[in-house]
Amino acid sequence: MVSRFNRGNPRRSNRPRFYTRRKVCMFCVEKVSSIDYKDISKIRRYISERARIEPRRKTGACSKHQRAVTLAIKRARHLALLPFVPLQSQSEREVYA
Ligand SMILES: [Zn+2]
């Protein structure tokens, strides 16, 4: 019997698909007004293994700071401080072939 609570899609549960915890924006905590594109150690955390900018649901950054991070990453990429594409290794090439 299908209960009236999940009659639409019985396979869909109430649990979120991604592990999300109530995160606070790191930059808001540190009261950072502008993000330095030269500060790679800080920006690094907002880039995935595949050299992509992490989405907000992962970083927990607020929209204001997420935009600032994105801008900083793009500037850093332009100056070759950060990669556009991940470094290719032999093992990686096999995995993502
Ligand atoms: Zn913020």
Image (cartoon, helix red, strand yellow):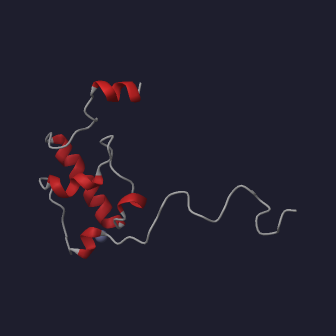
Give the residue drawn at x 19%, y 70%.
33
Q: Nearer the viewer, residue 43 or 16?
A: 16
Position in image of residue 97 (x %, y %): 41, 24
Residue 84: quarter of image:
top left
Reply above or below: 92 against 10.
above
- Left/right placement of residue 29 relative to residue 24 reads left
- Left/right placement of residue 52 relative to residue 27 reads right
Q: Quarter of the picture for ligand 1?
A: bottom left
Reply above or below: 12 against 47.
below
Number of marks: 0
Give the residue drawn at x 77%, y 69%.
5
Reply above or below: 78 against 30.
above
> Among all residues in the image, which is located at the extreme front?
91
Residue 13: quarter of image:
bottom right
Give the residue drawn at x 29%, y 65%.
65
Position in image of residue 73 (x %, y %): 23, 50
Position in image of residue 78 (x %, y %): 18, 41
Residue 16: quarter of image:
bottom right
Q: Nearer the viewer, residue 31 or 34?
A: 31
- Left/right placement of residue 38 relative to residue 45 reads left
Give the residue drawn at x 34%, y 25%.
93
